């Protein structure tokens, strides 16, 4: 799987609820009625995802700007 | 039949008179009676969504400094006066009154040889005035035909130096098609975007509205802008019976020229300046009729429910929608279909203006980078243009990769003339012409002419 949003450091995180290490997984995200898929560090137990600061301020902010209505 | 009171002017004497928006089914007319010149009736809205559904309420912007105190009241105290409710999102600077065409339709009534151009030093002062009245606005250089000035690149640079980050050129494209060095100089000076007169896909329309064949020339002008990284917006003036049957073919052509062409901005004809029809201004295409025609003539590629009312100007003045153009020419709407479920909470007008300025400067400029690899600028098969079927979510990265270059807007603005002028709408205007003496004058007030051609503001 191509997992450009998942760094080796991300996979050192452990889900507090399930006590399982995160794995790269495909998740769906939705913004202003548009649905996308991307790969994120994900808990294989409960599906909880980790969104890094660089992703939130980078690609996700860029998508938000493109989709923002005037 | 519903009657909604407002104010307008008499098309003969331009005095302010009471008016009513009179609805009969989906058709709304502005009806007014001048004690001296009789009753006038002009259609301003015809179709769905109904006028009452097409809303985007705003709380008025606070304008400082205001050039003029209210004396005679709207629309006579422009500059702007205290009654005005929106700041400028775009300031038009008219750099010449000369033109190299003599079109049957011209807001400005420009002529091949008119008066002397203002000096560059004078225009520098205008930019400073514009910055003091409307800091951070987008700029449109207009006229006349601005490209008749050899020093236009210097004017662009002066605008940039005054602080304006987005400078657009309103042009017929004639010189851009012929003079690549000039286009290069404009780009190097900081020109971001060209707002190009583009009325049809064949020369029958150009001959009728512009007096000469221009189709090949317009394509060369678009290519020249693409070569130098200047975004192009195609701007058809829609005249019923002349080019309203080319709405679909224009859009197909424009999609084929994405990403060099950033969008199509339709301008239904208004009866000010010079126009081909009789002065009663009866032949009109209103915004809902245009939305329906776009859907019908594009075979559903663009849907009427894609379009939204503006967050900046009065809702009844415009519509817009954003798309991405996928490889092969299919388009996908960037926003879900519009749903009317009662009205929405008001937004601050200033916030709407800021959002619009950012959106326009991002969207109507050329993309930061040219598409990677061998992908051609034009879609080779215009028959491939259509709406992308719903095919599940895109990968975020694939979406971004495409959207960075191939976003495409479809929009329209309905200008007001002496028959249709609604002062409620005028007070919400955000497209202002810089008048060196008065200050900022809303576009429709600046261009307003009476039935005999007498102008309210334009000198």
Image (cartoon, coloured by chain):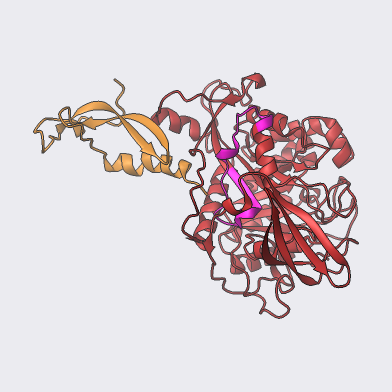
Q: Quadrant of the C terminus of chain B?
A: bottom right
Q: Is residue A29 left or right of residue B200?
A: left
How far across and down, in percent of the image, does residue B242 sit? 83, 37
The answer to which of B389 and B190 lies nearer the viewer is B389
Q: Residue at x 67, y 35 (%)?
A: B294
Q: Quadrant of the N terminus of chain B?
A: bottom right
How far across and down, in percent of the image, does residue B13 sit? 86, 69
B44 in relation to B426, above or below: above
Residue B364, quarter of the rendered image:
top right
The answer to which of B21 and B142 lies nearer the viewer is B21
B223 in relation to A58, above or below: above
Is B305 colored magenta in this rendering?
Answer: yes
The answer to which of B395 and A30 lies nearer the viewer is A30
How far across and down, in percent of the image, does residue B381 sit? 65, 18
Residue B123, quarter of the rendered image:
bottom right
B100 in relation to B404, above or below: below
Q: Residue furthest front?
A: B1
Q: Chain B's shade in the image? A: red
How far across and down, in percent of the image, does residue B411 sit? 63, 43
**Residue numbers of the magenta segment:** B296-320
Q: Residue at x 51, y 24 (%)?
A: B389
Q: Residue at x 72, y 29 (%)?
A: B249
B14 in relation to B24, above or below: below
Is B61 colored magenta in this rendering?
Answer: no
Chain in orange, by letter, is A
Q: Residue at x 33, y 29 (%)?
A: A38
């Amino acid at each position: 799987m191509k997992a450009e949003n998942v760094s080796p450091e991300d996979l050192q995180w452990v889900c507090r609820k399930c006590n399982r290490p995160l794995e790269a997984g495909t998740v769906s995200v939705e913004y202003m009625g548009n649905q996308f898929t991307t790969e994120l560090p994900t808990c294989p137990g409960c599906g909880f995802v980790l969104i890094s600061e660089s992703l939130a301020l980078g690609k996700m902010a860029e998508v938000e700007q493109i989709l923002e209505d005037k | 039949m519903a009657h909604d009171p407002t104010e307008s002017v008499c098309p003969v004497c331009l005095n302010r008179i009471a008016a009513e928006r009179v609805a009969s089914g989906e058709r709304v007319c502005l009806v007014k009676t001048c004690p001296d010149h009789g009753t006038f009736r002009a259609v301003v809205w015809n179709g769905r969504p109904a006028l009452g559904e097409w809303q985007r309420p705003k709380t008025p912007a606070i304008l400082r400094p205001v050039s003029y105190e209210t004396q005679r009241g709207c629309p006579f105290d422009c500059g702007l006066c205290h009654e005005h409710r929106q700041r400028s999102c775009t300031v038009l600077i008219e750099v010449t009154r000369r033109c190299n065409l003599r079109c049957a339709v011209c807001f400005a009534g420009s002529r091949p040889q008119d008066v002397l151009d203002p000096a560059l030093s004078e225009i520098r002062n205008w930019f400073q005035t514009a910055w003091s009245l409307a800091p951070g606005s987008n700029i449109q250089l207009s006229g006349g035909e601005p490209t008749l000035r050899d020093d236009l690149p210097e004017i662009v640079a002066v605008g940039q130096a005054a602080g304006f980050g987005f400078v657009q050129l309103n042009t017929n494209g004639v010189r851009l098609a012929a003079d690549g060095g000039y286009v290069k100089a404009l780009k190097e000076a900081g020109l971001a975007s060209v707002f190009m007169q583009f009325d049809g896909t064949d020369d029958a329309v150009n001959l009728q509205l512009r007096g000469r064949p221009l189709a090949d020339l317009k394509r060369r002008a678009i290519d020249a802008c693409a070569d130098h990284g200047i975004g192009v917006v195609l701007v058809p003036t829609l005249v019923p019976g002349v080019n309203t049957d080319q709405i679909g073919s224009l859009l197909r052509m424009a999609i084929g020229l994405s990403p060099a062409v950033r969008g199509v901005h339709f301008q239904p004809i208004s009866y000010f300046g010079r126009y081909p029809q009789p002065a009663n201004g009866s032949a009109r295409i209103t915004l809902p009729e245009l939305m329906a025609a776009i859907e019908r003539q594009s075979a559903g590629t663009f849907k009427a429910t894609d379009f939204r009312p503006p967050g900046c100007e009065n809702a009844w003045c415009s519509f817009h929608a954003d798309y991405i153009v996928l490889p092969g020419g299919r388009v996908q709407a960037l926003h879900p279909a519009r749903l009317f479920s009662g009205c929405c909470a008001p937004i601050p007008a200033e916030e709407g203006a800021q959002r619009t300025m950012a959106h326009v400067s991002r969207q109507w400029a050329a993309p930061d980078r040219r598409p990677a690899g061998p992908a051609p600028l034009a879609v080779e098969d215009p028959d491939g243009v259509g709406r992308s079927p719903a095919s599940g979510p895109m990968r975020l990265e694939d979406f971004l990769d495409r959207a960075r270059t191939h976003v495409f807007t479809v929009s329209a603005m309905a200008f007001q003339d002496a028959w249709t002028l609604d002062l409620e709408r005028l007070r919400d205007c955000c497209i202002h012409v810089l008048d060196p003496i008065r200050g900022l004058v809303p576009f429709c007030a600046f261009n307003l002419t009476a039935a005999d051609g007498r102008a309210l503001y334009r000198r």
